[in-house]
Image (spheres, rainbow, N blue to C red):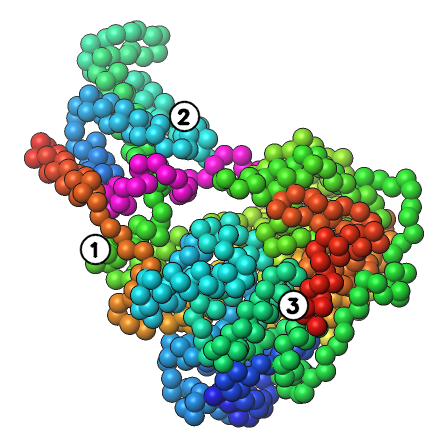
Amino acid sequence: MLRQAKALQYYPAEDFLQRISPLAKISVLISLSTFLFISQSVLVHLAIFFFSTVLFLFQPISFFKLHGSKVLIITTAFIGLLQLVFISEGNPVLNLYFFEITSKGILQSVSASARFISIILLSYLFVLSTDPGKFVLSLVGIGLPYRLGYTLITALRMIPMVKAEVEKILFAQITRGANYSPIHLKKTTINISRFLKVVLIAIFKRVNQLVISMDGRSFGLYDKRSTLSDIHFQRTDYMIIFLSLALILISIIWR
Amino acid sequence: MIELKDFSFCYQGSNTSVLDQVNLSIQAGDWLVISGKSGCGKSTLALAIAGFLGKILPGETKGQILLDGINIDEMETYEISKKIYLVQQNPENQFCTLTVKDEIAFGLENRKFPAVEIEDRILSSLTALKAEDLMERRLIELSGGQQQKIAIATALALRPEILILDEPTSSLDKESLHSLLQSLSMLRTENKMGVVIIEHRVPDIRSLNALHFEMHSGRLFPGKVKVLPTYGDKTQQNTKSSPKSPSEILVQVKDLKVELGEYTVLDIDHLELRSGEIISLMGPNGSGKTTFLLSLLGMVNSKSVLREIIGHPTGIRLSRNQLAEIGLAFQNPDHQIFCDTVLDEIYYGPTNYGLEKTESDWIEGLISTFEFNELQKKHPYLLSFGQKGRLNLSSILSYKPHILLLDEVFIGQDLGNVLLILKTIRKYVDEHNSAAIIVNHLPDPVLGYADRLVYLDHGKKILDSDTDTAIKDYQQIFQWKHLEASNA
């Protein structure tokens, strides 16, 4: 229950990534991810890894302080290790007792690890630097129906609430002596079903009250609604979007 | 403006009428206070006036509700909402955006208000509740009381013709309540806004000069304002136990700190809870009371030099025996109901701990104390909010924990039940040499039963003394008398 690490969520700050429009950021994420998948060049993969690492250094949250960062590093290393162990093509570089490390194995190992961690870093950067509300408003701005947009926002709002609620429910149940020991399988199953029932009822109640609250504030009264904060695109945003689209195009042609 | 004519309502799947031939008329500028025991139908009446019954909440209706002469059955909910606005009991469940600003703007945006006016209304509604400092905050970071302020600010920004507030004061501190009453009075004068307040804490709102009704079993009757006992009441001072020494330290913390982004939510240098003691943990909304309880159990990200429950450091996995020593009640009773009948729920803890036979007399006593004799076979979810709260307490006391950690257990309780809970806790603590921390906003009755008052403000402990001394300090520090006088 104790969490010392920072959760992967949006943290308001004044860095340059937060000044870029969410749509520009998502286009960079999509284009670089596409490029990573299509390109076979290790140098390109390393360049994108270097780029995303530098970007991470310029924002206030350290990757190592994020929840699950250690698991990601271990997974990246494991992916690299698998390539080293199982790829036998190429020139032998090192002969160990059980397997041989080849030049192609090393290249594939670096490439696969760089691809994986780059996509993770870029996605993390997007989440850490993007206000979900503004992201949805941007999508509404380019034609997403606002009802659908608010479905996304309420879902985003529900996630941390339900998570906190789940912890409370579990703690309340455990202090009342609920047994979750795998040795007592029957009791554990009953307790899990009781726990899930409370969680589900809590969610349904929330949804019901949310509907009352939204309808009570004239949600859906008009086809369009005014907005407190319009998302304005800067010249930089247009440039980033243009470059991202160009990169996607280049990736496809290059393929 | 709105008129209920012989209106009755029965929820789908139930045979009992929650509202029974209610007749009520509310005109522009009218102020009504509706009180009554928990489960008597007050919240359902609020939903009826706001036009949700039979539409979003299915059930059988009889009689009529007329809004400006038109039957509300013939109107869409959003049309009704232009004139009537309901602030529900649980503020957290009403929010549909991520930030305070967006939440208050939500209704105004739906009605196509221009951005400049939206900005103005956000600021004025927050100012009215002295909550301007919350404007840039994210909703998830707010305390229960702060969330309640935002739910009310949302309503004030929309300036409805009739505003219905369902238990608006349950989580509000005295100062916030005072600000709310002032801004409501202003809106009454300036905008002729009608206000319906569903409330247990009637004495707190007596200054409103409102019509008072009481509900009993779904029916409305002209009401009489009851007076809450005060902490100076001689009869209550006798309820405290005589000091026993030396007593065992059950809970202690040193340098406990919780940070949320740039905000320090909690910074407690030192706190102890000894056996035989009841601590009333108070403080303004957002002062860190709930966070303190959660951090004590290791449920939030926190740092501390020392944090122990019965000599065992918390924040790491507690053993089954140690868990059995903790009786924990959260604000929302729905989060703590695990069984299909009231009786099973009360026996849940004792059965899990193997105490169901040895403690059966004690449990039967609890059933009787909290008047669950007739409700034993009923599903707990069919109980009222207040009854569920008392069921939570029974299901905790049933396994005789050593430490009670109770977070706002008085929400949804009428005066009689507040006193019943307090008496029961006091008796339990004295007889079992256990201890309790009660988070609350009710100094009047609670201080009469507690041994110590710990007052938090902005996450820091600014008062920690025995209640007799604290009452005096409390009045001086927070100008209690001034607030009382201006409310009266």
At numbered mark 1, what does the secondary structure look like: helix, strand or loop?
loop
Residue B408 horizontal/vertical position (percent): 66, 58
Q: CA distance from mark 2 to mark 3?
A: 50 Å
Q: Which mark is residue A142?
A: 1
Badge 3 density bin: few <14, some 14–19, many ≥20, Cα 10 Å: many
Q: Which comes before the other along the chain, label 1 or label 2? A: 2
Nearer to the camera, B146 or B374 = B146
Look at discs 2 and 3 and give the one toward the viewer. Answer: 3
Q: What residue does disc 3 label? A: B412
Please, which chain is the residue tagged with disc 2 on? A
According to the picture, the residue beneath numbered tag 2 turns out to be A74
Task: Depth check: give the residue in front, B227 or A245.
Answer: B227
Residue A15 on the magenta segment:
yes
Residue B170 magenta-drawn?
no
The lab-note entry on whether marks 2 and 3 share a chain reads no
Would you say A153 lies left or right of B200 here?
Answer: left
Give me the disc on residue B6.
none
Q: Residue furthest left?
A: A253
Q: Chain of mark 3?
A: B
Query: Where does residue A231 sit, x and y in percent of width and height?
Result: 27, 52
Disc 1 residue type (three-letter): Ile
Identify the residue at horizontal 37%, vertical 67% (top origin): B108
Residue sitting at x 43%, y 70%: B158
| Lateral position of residue B125 relative to residue A72, left or right | right
**In this rendering, position of residue B273 left or right of residue A61:** right
